Each structure stands twice: as structure tokens, then as C-alpha cells.
Amino acid sequence: MSVIERMLGRPDGPGDDNNGSLTIAPMRKRDLRQGILDTEAHAYPTPWSPGVFQSEIDQVAGGSRYYLTARRSSGTASGSRRSSKGRIVGHAGLWFTLDEAHVTNVAVHPDARRTGVATALMLALAEEAIRRECTAWTLEVRVSSDGAQELYRNFGFVPAGVRKNYYENVEDAIVMWCHDIQHDAYRRRLDRLGATR
């Protein structure tokens, strides 16, 4: 059983938006109107358009992209099973090139932040990058986004450079890389992150 499967089987702790279980699932086009576009609009000054998302989802079938949603159930139980339906509270994606994965997008709705959603999404992305035999993954993050930088450092990312005026031709991006993700030490890091969520 993978770290993400073990993690998703655990109920979440107390909190406003933490009363239901979290489900990570492949992104579908219908999800755009069911919460992704709203989350994206809250997460970024210049959000991706529906057309950009549709193009990215279309590329999933070819194997060059991988997109997920995080859905928080209402916490109501049906028999002994929790409802698998719920509100979309986050999304994330990868772009694959040769033996590397590039994190294209990680967004969490403001009222679900600091509840483990971004960690769950990143764990699922890490599992997929490892499954596809990537040896490293990379991303860009705003220089002003301290919370996101902390999340990525927890996953082993380190700064490797700066892209000037990358965001809206105004804000710089820190380029971060994480290497050797096929090694046992990285598996142990993911296990620790999954256990603490």
C-alpha cells in the first residue's frame, strides 16, 4: 500500500473544513465548473482560463500530463462508509519530460488551507512521478509565497535559481529542484510526511 493510500484512509482531525475525509482523484473537465475554476481564481492573481485547463486535461491521455483534484466529503456516513462525494478544495498537476516531472499547478481554496490538502496533493504527485520512473522534479514558486516554499522544502525541494519577472511580468519566481526521488531516503521522507498529515 502506498503512502498516499494509507494517508487517505485516515480520518482528518478537527477543524472547520476538516470534518470529512479527503479524496484525491483524477481531474475531469466537469470538475472545472464544480470548484476548480473558483479555487484557481482565489489562488492566483492571473488564474488559468478554462481553455488552458481543458488543453492540459486533453494531454493527460497522451501521458505528458497528470492532474488531480482534492475533494472534501461532508463527513456524513452511509452505513460504515463515508460519502465519496464532496466539495473540490484543491487541485494540482504534473508535466512529464524525459525522466523529470514539472509541477505545473498546486492550488487550495482559501477556506481549506492549512488542513493538509496541499500535502496530500503533493504526496499523490510524488507517487506518480516515482511510478513513472522520474529521477527528479521541479517547480517555480513566487518569491513572496513563504507558505508554498515551506511546503516544497518539506518535500526536499531546494532553490536552484531565479526567473526574473516570471509572474505577471512583475514578480520573480524561485526555481526549485528535488533530485534522487527514486532512492529509499526519499521514500522515507514521503512516509514521514504522510504519517504527520
Image (tube, rainbow, N blue to C red):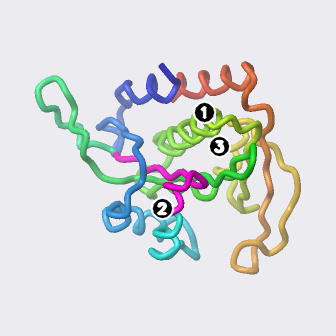
The residue type indicated by label 2 comes to Ile
Q: Is residue 43 left or right of residue 158?
A: left
Classed neighbour count for the residue bearing mark 2: other residues with Cα under 10 Å, few (<14), some (14–19), many (≥20): many
Stretch in magenta: 58-71
Q: Residue at x 47, y 71 (%)?
A: 41
Q: Residue at x 52, y 24 (%)?
A: 3
Query: Tag on residue 131?
Result: 1
The residue type indicated by label 3 comes to Leu
Q: Position of residue 176 (x, y in %)?
A: 79, 50
Q: Is residue 170 left or right of residue 130?
A: right
Of label 2 and label 1, which has the lower sequence position? 2
Q: Position of residue 163 (x, y in %)?
A: 83, 67
Marks 2 and 1: CB-CB under 8 Å? no
User: Which is more toward the observer, 163 or 134?
Assistant: 134
Query: Tag on residue 194?
Result: none
> Distance of mark 3 from mark 2, alpha carbons?
25 Å
Look at mark 2 in the image and give the residue it sits on: 57
**Image height of 129 relative to 89, above or below:** above
Q: Secondary structure at mark 2?
A: helix
Look at mark 3 in the image and give the residue it sits on: 151
**Image height of 39 relative to 133, above or below:** below
The residue type indicated by label 1 comes to Arg
> Distance of mark 3 from mark 1, alpha carbons?
22 Å
Q: In front: mark 3 or mark 1? A: 1
Q: Quadrant of residue 193?
A: top right
Q: Quadrant of residue 85?
A: top left
Q: Residue at x 33, y 68 (%)?
A: 33
Q: Secondary structure at mark 1?
A: helix
Classed neighbour count for the residue bearing mark 1: other residues with Cα under 10 Å, few (<14), some (14–19), many (≥20): few
Classed neighbour count for the residue bearing mark 3: other residues with Cα under 10 Å, few (<14), some (14–19), many (≥20): some
Q: Secondary structure at mark 3?
A: helix
